[in-house]
């Protein structure tokens, strides 16, 4: 069977890689093409375009790069038509992927959407478009099933693919020694995987090193960027930037400062106390505060439906507030223990690994029935 996958950012590359692996295990004749990244490419198949050329965040950035975005969309549509897959699998990245879904639907191609768009956060009217252009929707967050049910949609809850990725992770026993991090507790800095996130948030993160001389601050680098890009926003701070090592970094970290996104959930599943941060274009944030229909920004708090991890957004993301929060997180005590107890409850809610295998089985079954 022929499968075409579209992932537009780092998290989609991770989940796409695990899904490709599961598809190949269940379909020995699987033919795979995709927009994705290094992790998907490592699983085989044909990488058509790397996600690093696709991710733009915020109205201004989208507007400035509109010509590139439209070209990427055109290239994707043309490649899908040229290879006529049995099933199109769209992974998150809804601004781009819902347009591709709409196109594929007109061509009679089965459309599966893995990791449902976060329409519950804002612009809930997009559910009606999803109903029209997506044949099968796969949810990875427990509360999404009830949300879509309100709109008369039957969706498949498959569990969370992060559990798959973490379950298969094997820590490097030499990681700490290899990077000369042996004499101090590690604080992981995860500034995000988009240019705009790194440029706005990393400068605030690196200032913390001067406030905590007894900790090692280590930056998790996204594989789509070079070291020189990170150094542009570190104001001369000599902090290690480690690429393709985020899970090892979290495994050994005492605490973390994490840009809001999938990484907040990963950090909690690794049982690392964290403070969640976010900074974006002021116009985007103002609009977001007006239209967002959720109480929290981080996935950890959304799933638990309470404030588990502190969220420092926009002007609150500064050296003073970050220093205060880290001083709460680092030492043993009731504050840290409360977070660790909530992590245990979170893992119970999330359930067991197996999302990738379950999704692959459902997709193959739906494609056969078509």
Image (cartoon, helix red, strand yellow):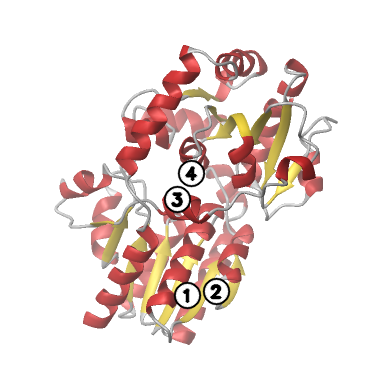
Q: Is residue 177 left or right of residue 135?
A: right
Disc count in the image? 4
Query: Label 4, label 2: how many angstroms apart (C-alpha)?
Result: 27 Å
Q: Position of residue 34 (x, y in %)?
A: 52, 72
Q: Nearer the viewer, mark 4 or mark 2?
A: 4
- Looking at the image, tell me whether mark 3 or mark 4 is earlier in sequence order: 3
Which residue bears the numbered disc 2? 75
Q: Quadrant of the N terminus?
A: bottom left
Query: Label 3, label 1: how many angstroms apart (C-alpha)?
Result: 29 Å
Residue 106 higher or lower than 257, as above or below: below
Residue 324 higher or lower than 236, as above or below: above
Query: Label 2, label 3: how many angstroms apart (C-alpha)?
Result: 30 Å
Query: Label 3, label 4: how many angstroms apart (C-alpha)?
Result: 9 Å
Q: Position of residue 334 (x, y in %)?
A: 46, 13
Q: Nearer the viewer, mark 3 or mark 1?
A: 3
Which residue bears the numbered disc 3? 162
- Looking at the image, tell me whether mark 3 or mark 1 is earlier in sequence order: 1
- Looking at the image, tell me whether mark 4 or mark 1 is earlier in sequence order: 1
Which residue bears the numbered disc 4? 262
Query: Label 1, label 2: how many angstroms apart (C-alpha)?
Result: 6 Å
Q: Position of residue 26 (x, y in %)?
A: 37, 77
């Amino acid at each position: 069977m022929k499968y075409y996958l579209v992932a537009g950012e780092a998290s989609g590359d991770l989940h796409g890689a695990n899904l490709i692996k599961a598809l190949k295990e269940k379909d020995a004749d699987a033919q795979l093409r995709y927009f994705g990244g290094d992790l998907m490419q490592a699983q085989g198949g044909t990488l058509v375009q790397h996600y690093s050329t696709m991710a733009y965040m915020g109205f201004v950035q989208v507007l400035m790069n509109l010509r590139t975005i439209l070209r990427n969309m055109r290239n994707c549509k043309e490649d899908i038509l040229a290879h006529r897959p049995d099933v199109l699998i769209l992974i998150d990245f809804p601004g781009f992927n819902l347009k591709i879904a709409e196109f594929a639907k007109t061509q009679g191609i089965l459309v599966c959407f893995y990791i449902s768009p976060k329409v519950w956060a804002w612009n809930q009217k997009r559910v009606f478009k999803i109903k029209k252009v997506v044949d099968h929707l796969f949810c990875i967050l427990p509360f999404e099933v009830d949300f879509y049910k309100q709109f008369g949609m039957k969706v498949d809850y498959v569990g969370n693919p992060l559990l798959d990725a973490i379950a298969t992770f094997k820590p490097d026993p030499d990681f700490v020694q290899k990077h000369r991090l042996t004499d101090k507790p590690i604080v992981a800095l995860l500034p995000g995987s988009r240019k705009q996130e790194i440029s706005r948030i990393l400068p605030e993160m690196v200032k913390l090193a001067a406030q905590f001389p007894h900790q090692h601050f280590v930056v998790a680098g996204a594989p789509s960027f070079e070291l020189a890009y990170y150094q542009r926003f570190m104001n001369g701070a000599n902090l290690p930037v480690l690429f393709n090592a985020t899970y090892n970094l979290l495994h050994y970290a005492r605490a973390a400062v994490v840009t809001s996104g999938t990484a907040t959930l990963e950090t909690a599943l690794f049982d690392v106390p964290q403070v969640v941060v976010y900074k974006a274009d002021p116009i985007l944030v103002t609009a977001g505060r007006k239209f967002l229909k959720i109480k929290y920004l981080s996935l950890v708090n959304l799933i638990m439906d309470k404030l588990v991890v502190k969220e420092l957004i926009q002007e609150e993301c500064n050296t003073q507030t970050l220093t205060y929060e880290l001083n709460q997180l680092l030492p043993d005590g009731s504050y840290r223990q409360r977070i660790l107890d909530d992590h245990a409850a979170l893992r119970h809610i999330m359930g067991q690994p197996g999302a990738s295998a379950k999704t692959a089985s459902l997709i193959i079954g739906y494609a056969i029935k078509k």
